[in-house]
Amino acid sequence: MRTGWEPKASGQTLCHDMNNDAVATVERIADAVLPTEHGKFRIVGYRSRATGEEFVALVKGTLTREEPTLVRIHSQCLTGDVFHSLRCDCGRQLAAALELVELEGRGVILYQQQEGRGIGIVNKIRAYAEQDAGLDTVDANLALGFAADARSYDECAAVLCDLGLQRVRVMSNNPEKLKALEDNGFEIVERVELHVEPHDGFAFYLATKRDRMGHLIDPSEPSVADDREGPVSFPVRPDGGTVTKE
């Protein structure tokens, strides 16, 4: 399991003082107004100069280096964000982040095209089939010959730097995202936990991310069973009730 995240001591090199080559890896392409059911945002489109990967930033309010700003790096999840899949909590996290930014009146949601932790939508469906056969989300990717998590966040950091941010309040439970921002010169003032309605459908998924990938998820959530060959029972409700995952 990966180690957790601890905030760096002050005094690190700031993103705006680092080599400009990092920011130059992305290009700002377009900027427009986007009204949503959560509120009105600016939508800013970026493209990687190296790979052509596209990024979308939803921006609310005036951004400055000095003011700690709400930020979420959200990896594309077509099944969760669009189809509202109950295999994961991705769509609910995105909605919660948008609502929180709207409530605060300032923040950035950065949407990156790294579906399925970097393996793409079709391979993600293949991984779903492996999960249907009994594997968890980590072993499903490994069984297909992929890394458990193939994502990179350096260009996400470049986008946030281009938007003028420096001190951030990060909405994430993924220590790799937090580490990437710090490694790229951002000061993480606070990790903001997003609270989403729990559901039996993704309880095992969240436990796997916590127990096998080091995500910063409430330890009261169920633990991944050591023996995954048989049915797995785990608590999923506040009243202590259980469900069984075949």
Image (tube, rainbow, N blue to C red):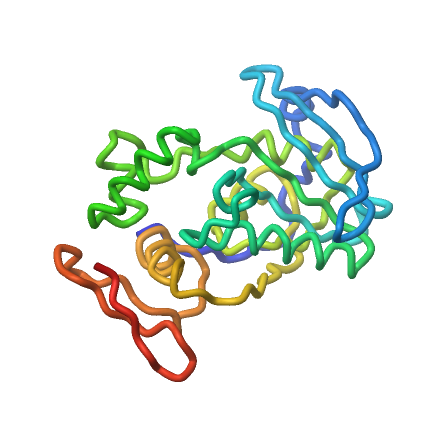
Query: Where does residue 60 sit, x and y in percent of width and height?
Result: 80, 46
Most distant residue in the right direction: 62
Most distant residue in the front direction: 83
Query: Where does residue 114 sit, x and y in percent of width and height?
Result: 49, 32
Identify which residue is drawn at 69% across, 52% down. 98
Q: 199 or 161: which is nearer to us?
A: 199
Query: Where does residue 95 sit, x and y in percent of width and height?
Result: 63, 54
Count of marks placed on residues: 0
Identify which residue is drawn at 68% across, 40% down. 14
Q: 246 or 55: which is nearer to us?
A: 246
Please say if 191 is above or below 176: below
Q: Quadrant of residue 236?
A: bottom left
Q: Quadrant of residue 54?
A: top right
Identify which residue is drawn at 80% across, 38% down. 34
Q: Quadrant of residue 202?
A: bottom left
Q: Is residue 108 left or right of residue 202?
A: right
Q: Is residue 66 left or right of residue 158?
A: right
Please say if 112 is above or below 178: above
Q: Is residue 199 left or right of residue 32?
A: left
Query: Where does residue 80 sit, x and y in percent of width and height?
Result: 50, 46
Identify which residue is drawn at 63% across, 40% down. 185
